[in-house]
Amino acid sequence: MNRRRAELFWFCLFAGPALLGFVAFNLWPMLDSLWLSFCQYEVIAPPRFIGLQNYRYLFTYDPSFWPSVKVTLVFTAVQVPLAIGAALALALLLNQPVRGRGFWRAVYFLPSILPQAAFAVVFGYIFQADGGLLNRGLALFGVPGTAWTTSPTWALPVLIVISLWGFGYPMVIFLAALQDVPRELYEAAHIDGAGAWARFRHVTLPLISPIIFFNVVMGVISALKVFDLAYAFSVAQAQPTPGGPARATLFYGLNLYEQAFGYFHMGLASAMAWLLFAFILVITFINFRAGRRWVHYGD
Amino acid sequence: MNRRSTPATLALYATLAFGALVMLLPLAWMLLTSLKTYPEILRNPAPWLPARPQWGNYSAVLAGFAYYRFFLNSVFVAVMVIAGTILTCCPAAYAFAFYDVKHKDLIFGALLATLMLPAQVTVIPLFKAFATLHWVNTYLPLIVPSWLGGNVFGIFLLRQFFRTIPRSFIEAARLDGASEWAILWRLVVPMSLPAVLTVAVFTFLWSWNDLFNPLVYLQSESLGTLPVGLLYFIARAEQLTGGSIGQVPWHLVMALATVMVTPVIVLFAFVQRRFVEGVAASGVKG
């Protein structure tokens, strides 16, 4: 009895700050944001309840909402498979008996921890039309370059390419999972006459499927939230408003930031935030349902 | 066996080396550009290598643009955020690892669920609240959340690690009359230094690289951290050159970017093995 009360006391003391932070910086703002999404709130006057009008405006009138949804979905649909594929391919390479595995792993991981703002700026220079590194490289092969960053067609692909430098987290996680696959399984498969592809398809893939699943979910969630990269890229390209050219890189997170802190349409931006949150919840849920079918959770 | 594997091995190393080159290319080009002169930058095409490395570019931006201020601001914020994270996440992780309290797992689940909550959802109410407290344009909105266990991922990682410590160790220390506070900081934390280090590095990266929060909360230029400072500099350079990207002093911009990136690389060089293993463990166990 005494012990239980003592434990409760210490629990409250030790976990208290974190629980307070949970309420103050997560739970309360989450609910307040939901409330604000039903309000007109432009900072100068207190929030005024307007029902679903923010949502209706976003879906029917707002000229920037659907373009930003499209940009974000295209980015996610292209970037996540490419990044996960690259991460898995490199993890498989590094899982071979290579010398200096730690060194290679560090080199491939490094770009993932560098500030995205710096990366966006450096790549802006590399992709420059006149004398940019890429166009000069292409010229060596006689391929004509183009104005990558100012072209509405190419600006989004450029951002996808830049973000592909950051596959370090899934790569490292794949590598750890691959090293957990018991060697005997490969030996058994080898004795049964399975080739390299068959061993990958029937031994490796089923065993690491939970990890693929985990990495895809994490990759999708972070792709939907892209901000730093797109904002810094816009500034480095001297775009009059972020998200150019012609809204080609107006990511959802960027659009939301502009609505909230550029135009102070905070009610509208809250509605956007809740749509994003709801979408993330649905995607995660669907992933878990779909995952149950093809992910192999064996012990 | 050996004869057959030689070409394959060669191909493997060639692939790895080529890939590594591609990965490091942007960093190399950043560094090379930062050492050129302005005339070299304006030449089209710019030379591959600077005729003579202009290390003076660094002192020019650090002093001339007062970039050292942004650097010190970033250091200050990062140190405060790391201190708060370690001081509040360690006890929280200990509490969730070792105390039997009703609904403990439910509460922990709720904490973990906040990892799915995008910052875009919470930023507007928080901005509103911080504005009422007159905290906007101070460092408090960046620092205070970390002093209230703001890094849930850190709590998770530490708890995973703490749970591998046998309970008998804790019980023995209690029998010796050690207080819970002493058990945490003198026994559990020293035994978990790799995990604590991983969390500290994560927190550093998160704080150092963050553009979103400083952009929202810091309005005066003099308070800015490095990522905002870099963008201020570019915006100003674009104004000075009439918005022509071709004339932006890219050598100075790249010097700024190098200053921002170097501490991360140096830190990574020291801790990379532990840190990468911490990352790997988080995914495999999570």
Image (spheres, coloured by chain):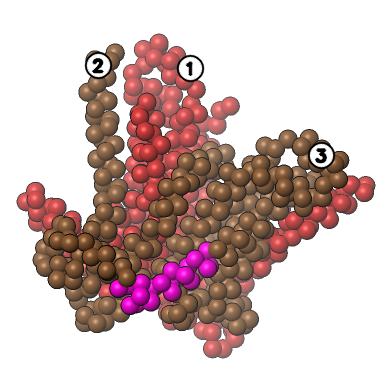
Is residue B80 positioned above or below A80 on the image? below
Check disc 3 and report the residue beneath it. B171
Q: Nearer the viewer, residue A258 or A54?
A: A258
Q: Nearer the viewer, residue B181 or A203?
A: B181
Q: Nearer the viewer, residue A231 or A154?
A: A231
Q: Chain of mark 2?
A: B
Name the side, left or right, on which A237 lies relative to B154: left
Q: Is residue B73 magenta?
A: yes
Which of disc 2 and disc 3 is earlier in sequence?
Answer: 2
Which residue is the extreme one toward the right? Answer: A1
Check disc 1 and report the residue beneath it. A184
- Marks 3/2 same chain: yes
* Three-letter residue code for mark 2: Arg
Which residue is the extreme one toward the left? Answer: A142
- Marks 3/1 same chain: no
* Three-letter residue code for mark 1: Glu
**Residue drawn at the location 44% of the way across and 40% of the way down:** A172
Q: Secondary structure at mark 2?
A: helix
Question: Residue B14 location, x and y as percent?
Answer: 24, 34
Pointers 3 and 1 in contact (C-beta within 8 Å) = no
Q: Which residues are magenta?
A: B60-78
Q: Secondary structure at mark 1?
A: helix
Q: Chain of mark 3?
A: B
* Three-letter residue code for mark 3: Glu
Q: Secondary structure at mark 3?
A: helix
**Residue drawn at the location 38% of the way across and 58% of the way down:** B262
Query: What colour do you see for chain B?
Result: brown
Name the side, left or right, on which A241 lies relative to B106: left
Query: What colour do you see for chain A?
Result: red
Q: Which mark is residue B4?
A: 2
Q: Is residue B232 visible?
A: no
